[in-house]
Image: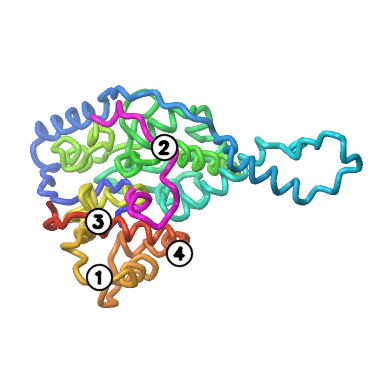
């Protein structure tokens, strides 16, 4: 699935190596690329708690659990004590949210692919010709770019690819637009629970070829790809985690970065030249596939014939191993509902 995709400022379709010829053309490319980088985006102002408080269902279950384990009352006529008295509900909400967030980043949201295994900073692209685009430090340590982030800042960056200064960033936000408020809150709660990493990560810069690619539209800032969505509010809660197409559609949205919005696959926009086209995972491309074939592809990185899959799908097993059976069944259920589509359409 496309969820393995980093912000690949790749070199697909590069007749653009005219970098070395025509100084006038290159001067134009630098100027045009910078103009795209400096675009100001008008994004809605989302707000949500970090972490989400315990739900009434969770509180009810906690009351029942504590009442069941409480000793019998010494005075049957006295009003029963509040079973939640003395319980730090905020701490419990944080603990549960962090656990949910940990699961998300280890299975469905590959944040560590760009921000590093410790979230202290990682490498997206590090090439003198294309550019130096590094995932920033997200931990609470020195050098973090998110220490003062509000919920609105996290929303704009993760789901819209827009920085606090209203300009675009390398964040592949189009993959994460469907993330619910609760899921984003859970991820942030988890990240904030991690050990501090004191690390300064340089801001991103384009090299000569990167400027040409940006100027000529071969690569795009994610915020520019779906500008009409910047005013759309997000769902607060994800669908119920059940093995059906509704939940499957929700969690499969992180695959659209490679497999496209209609899941018909084709060349991966912005991907490195050694990446093959993304597979068509509509019924056109998966004709004859069974659920067991699907599981093998995700959990073992092998196609229907048993042949190893190439990147980026070759990296999928390290995430799929952490997906629940319900998540995998739901994703497969959703794929079965997709209309057939020609590859690359």
Q: Earlier in the sequence, mark 3 or mark 2?
A: 2
| Pointer 3 residue | 337
Packing grade of label 1 (10 A; few <14, some 14-19, many >=20) is few
Badge 4 is on which residue? 321
Instruction: Please report contact status of discs 3 and 2: CB closer than 8 Å, yes or no.
Output: no
**Residue 91 rendering spot, x and y as whole percentages:** 67, 38
Label 2 and label 4: CA atoms lie apart by 33 Å
Q: Locate residue 105, reporting x and y percent.
A: 46, 50
Mark 4 crowd level (few <14, some 14–19, many ≥20, 10 Å Cα): some
Question: Which label's residue is closer to the chain start, 4 or 1?
Answer: 1
Q: Earlier in the sequence, mark 1 or mark 2?
A: 2
What stretch of residues is rendered in magenta?
228-249
Vertical position of residue 290 compared to residue 183: above or below: below
In this picture, is 272 found above or below 134?
below
Along the line of sight, the residue nearer the viewer: 136 or 296: 296
* Numbered tag placed on residue 202 in the rendering: 2
Give the tally of numbered discs: 4
Q: Residues within 10 Å of mark 3 (few under 14, many from 20)?
A: few
Reading the image, the residue beneath label 1 is 289
* Position of residue 118 in the picture relative to residue 328 (left or right): right
Quick one: 200 or 190, which is closer to the camera? 190
Question: Gap in Å between the C-alphas at discs 4 and 3?
Answer: 24 Å
């Amino acid at each position: 699935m496309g969820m393995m995709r980093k912000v690949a400022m790749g070199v697909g379709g590069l007749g653009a190596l005219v970098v070395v010829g025509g100084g006038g053309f290159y001067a134009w490319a630098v100027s045009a690329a910078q103009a795209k980088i400096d675009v100001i985006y008008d994004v809605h102002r989302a707000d949500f708690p970090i972490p989400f408080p315990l739900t009434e269902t969770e509180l009810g279950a906690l009351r029942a659990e504590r009442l069941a384990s409480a000793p019998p009352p010494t005075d049957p006529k006295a009003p029963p004590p509040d079973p939640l008295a003395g319980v730090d509900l905020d701490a419990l909400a944080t603990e549960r949210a962090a656990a949910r967030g940990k699961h998300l980043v280890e299975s469905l949201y590959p944040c560590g692919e760009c921000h590093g295994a410790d979230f202290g900073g990682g490498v997206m692209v590090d090439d003198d010709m294309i550019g130096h685009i590094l995932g920033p430090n997200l931990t609470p340590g020195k050098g973090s770019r998110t220490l003062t982030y509000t919920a609105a800042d996290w929303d704009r960056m993760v789901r819209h690819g827009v920085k606090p200064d209203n300009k675009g960033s390398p964040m592949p936000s189009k993959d994460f637009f469907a993330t619910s408020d609760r899921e984003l809150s859970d991820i942030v709660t988890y990240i904030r629970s991690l050990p501090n990493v004191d690390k300064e990560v340089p801001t991103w810069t384009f090299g000569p070829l990167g400027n040409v690619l940006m100027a000529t539209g071969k690569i795009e800032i994610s915020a520019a790809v779906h500008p009409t969505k910047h005013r759309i509010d997000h769902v607060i809660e994800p669908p119920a985690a059940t093995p059906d197409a509704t939940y499957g559609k929700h969690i499969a949205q992180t695959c659209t970065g490679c497999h496209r919005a209609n899941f018909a696959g084709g060349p991966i926009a912005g991907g490195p030249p050694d990446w093959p086209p993304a597979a068509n995972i509509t019924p056109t491309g998966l004709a004859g596939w069974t659920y067991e074939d699907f599981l093998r592809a995700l959990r073992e990185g092998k196609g229907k014939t048993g042949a190893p899959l190439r990147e980026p799908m070759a990296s999928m097993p390290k995430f799929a191993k952490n997906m629940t059976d319900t998540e995998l069944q739901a994703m497969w259920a959703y794929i079965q509902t997709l209309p057939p589509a020609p590859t690359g359409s």
